[in-house]
Amino acid sequence: MEIVTGYVEHIVFRNEENGYTVFQLESEAGEVTCVGTLNFISEGERLEIKGDYVNHNIYGSQLKISSYEMKEPEDLISIERYLGSGAIKGVGATLAGRIVRKFKTDTFRIIEEEPERLAEVNGISERKAREIALQVDEKKECAK
């Protein structure tokens, strides 16, 4: 069993009916093609994948997922990349940059524990702050 942690770089294919997904994971060791049935994941999310490598006769080496866990991004660049990836509706690259510049490595703690503080960021209303916090919470629940 292999364990690989990285960021969802690109979703190649997703079957919306059963969740079967093929995606590229950018890890420290390089890009890995991952396949398996996953709840809703988005590009930019950080995952810890457990599985076994298989060799597909057409597509080559793939990591067949047996389980996975969503991980919060750990550094400022990764936090900004995740928030600006489209994983959270209404937060693009520019707004993600403003959020991370304001809250630094406390960004996810603020979103989860003090979401009203997001309204301190230019371009975020109190309503939008609540929506962002709700989406982050829903993403965590989907990954369980």
Image (tube, grey):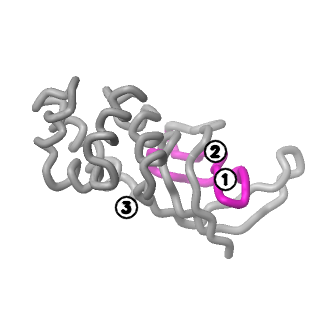
Identity of the amino acid at label 2?
Answer: Phe
Q: Position of residue 49 (x, y in %)?
A: 58, 63
Q: Quadrant of residue 3?
A: bottom right
Q: Residue furthest bottom?
A: 1
- Looking at the image, which residue is at 36% across and 52% down? 142
Horizontal side of 45 relative to 135 (left or right) equals: right
Q: Position of residue 136 (x, y in %)?
A: 29, 46
Q: Secondary structure at mark 2?
A: strand
Which is more N-terminal, label 1 or label 2?
2
Q: Nearer the viewer, residue 95 or 54?
A: 95
Q: Residue furthest right?
A: 57
Q: Which residue is mark 3?
A: 144
Is 105 magenta? The answer is no
Q: Which residue is mark 2?
A: 23
Q: Which residue is mark 1?
A: 34
Q: Position of residue 60 (x, y in %)?
A: 85, 51
In magenta, the rendered stretch is 17-41
Q: Secondary structure at mark 3?
A: loop
Disc 1/disc 3 C-alpha distance (Å): 19 Å
Identity of the amino acid at label 3?
Answer: Lys
Which is more N-terminal, label 2 or label 3?
2
- Looking at the image, which residue is at 46% across and 35% down? 85
Disc 3/disc 2 C-alpha distance (Å): 19 Å
